[in-house]
Amino acid sequence: MKTLMTLLTGAALAGSLTTAQANEIVVGGKNFTEQQILASMTSQYLDALGYDVEKRSGMGSAVLRQAQENGQIDLYWEYTGTSLINYNDVTERLSPEETYSRVKELDAEKGLVWLEPSEANNTYALAMREDDAEERGIESLSDLAQAVNEEEELTFALNAEFYAREDGWRPLQQAYDFRIGRGDVKRMDSGLVYQALRDGQVEVGLVFATDGRIPAFDFRVLEDDQNYFPAYALTPVVREETLEANPELAEQMNTLSGLLDDTTMSNLNAQVDVEKVTIERVAENFLEENDLL
């Protein structure tokens, strides 16, 4: 009987240790370049810190989020706007700070902890060729609106979704008090927008703020000085149970988050998508350059 009790106690203890093993971290990632870079970067970084890391990248957004809520993924990088709009059904327009505070509060109820947000904000943006923007003196969307209202000849390229959506093109013009005729707007696939802008077919194009083609094609992202576009701040999100088992993880991930901004992510994305460097090498080089490996 004593032997049986000892075995049972030992088995229970082993099960407890397996559940709360402090060094085991499952890192997730979505199925596009930026997310795959971050998943690789995080995995290499935590591995160097002594964690036993398993990486599961290439997942769809909703599937990845559900996997984290179910405890299958411990940590991944999420966008504040995605959680606010897609996972928590909040549609009111909020500032970047309000967006972060709201998702942090709402997701805490689901056992998820938002760590410190990075300066990388992968939201919609309008961009121009750098030399053209410099020549015209346009740095912000307010500058752009003024140029339009002064009847400068400007042609825009937008994807069809943004042109039609209720929080897209029309309310953007209202927010910045300018008006573009239909003939001056070309609707096309997102990928073609970058080519049209690069090749001079249009003067202004709708882009995503951390896309690697922005630095590769020498584009200037215009400052959204009235915070029209939703905030999509790139932020590490970790399960509360995982943090409890790994109390140093928050500070470690905040260190990594503090190194990322729009320019950094654009350059990393460009190395993969334009220069064709492998994701693992790009992530490794970044960590080495920042003394994290």
Image (cartoon, rainbow, N blue to C red):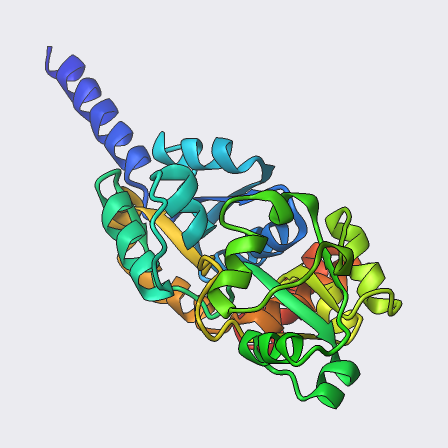
Mark count: 0
**Residue 112 at x, y = what percent?**
30, 44
- Residue 216 is left or right of residue 223, and the answer is right
- Residue 216 is left or right of residue 81, and the answer is right
Quarter of the figure with the C terminus: bottom right
- Residue 261 is left or right of residue 251, and the answer is right
The image shows residue 46, relative to residue 226, as above or below, that is: above
Looking at the image, which residue is at 11% across and 10% down? 1
The image shows residue 293, relative to residue 124, as above or below, that is: below
Looking at the image, which residue is at 38% across and 66% down? 254
**Residue 159 at x, y = what percent?**
70, 49
Residue 43 visible (yes or no): no
Outermost residue, left side: 2
**Residue 120 at x, y = what percent?**
51, 66
Residue 16 visible (yes or no): yes
The image shows residue 173, relative to residue 188, as above or below, that is: below
Name which quarter of the figure residue 97 lies in: bottom left
Looking at the image, which residue is at 34% across and 39% down? 88
Looking at the image, which residue is at 56% across and 44% down? 165
**Residue 219 at x, y = what percent?**
73, 74
Residues 105 and 70: in front is 105
